[in-house]
Image: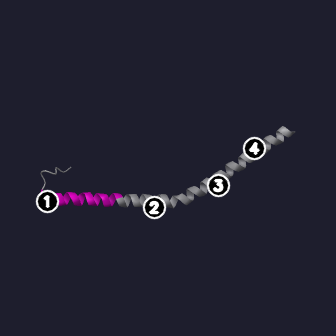
């Protein structure tokens, strides 16, 4: 990228500016990704709760069915 031994002060300033703008862009991208993740967490929790309730109901009904068959 840049050879530190052969650049002038102006080139060093440009290099620093390039690095700074790159860091700002990465920070903005990371912040956006974090916000999207945070927005999705309630939906994920709601779906997980619904799936857990369904799985629990199915499991309970299966056990009741087996017990009914065993007790006959």
Point 14% across, 60% down: residue: 10
Q: Quadrant of residue 22?
A: bottom left
Q: In the image, residue 46 lies at what x, y percent?
A: 60, 58
Identify the residue under disc 4. 62
Q: Which mark is residue 34?
A: none
> Can you tell which quarter of the image residue 8 is in?
bottom left
Indicate yes or no whether the magenta region holds residue 10.
Answer: yes
Is disc 4 surrounded by few (<14), some (14 to 19) or many (20+) residues within 10 Å? few
The image position of residue 71, as x and y in percent, is 86, 40
Query: Residue drawn at (43%, 58%), measured in percent from left and top?
Result: 33
Per the image, the residue denoted by label 3 is: 50
Highlighted range, magenta: 8-26
Could you tell me if the residues under marks 2 and 3 are in contact, i.e. CB atoms within 8 Å?
no
Marks 1/4: CA–CA distance = 76 Å
> Which residue position is annotated with label 1?
9
Q: Nearer the viewer, mark 1 or mark 2?
A: 1
Assess disc 1: are there few (<14), some (14-19) or many (≥20) residues with their C-alpha within 10 Å of its C-alpha: few
Disc 4 secondary structure class: helix
Q: Report which residue position mark 2 lands on.
A: 35
Distance from disc 4 to disc 3, alpha carbons, whole Å, reads 18 Å
């Amino acid at each position: 990228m840049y050879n530190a031994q052969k650049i002038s002060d102006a080139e060093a300033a440009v290099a620093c500016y390039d690095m700074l703008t790159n860091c700002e862009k990465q920070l903005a991208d990371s912040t956006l990704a974090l916000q999207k993740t945070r927005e999705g967490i309630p939906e994920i929790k709601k779906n997980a709760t619904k799936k857990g309730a369904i799985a629990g109901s199915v499991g309970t009904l299966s056990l009741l069915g087996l017990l009914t068959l065993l007790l006959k």
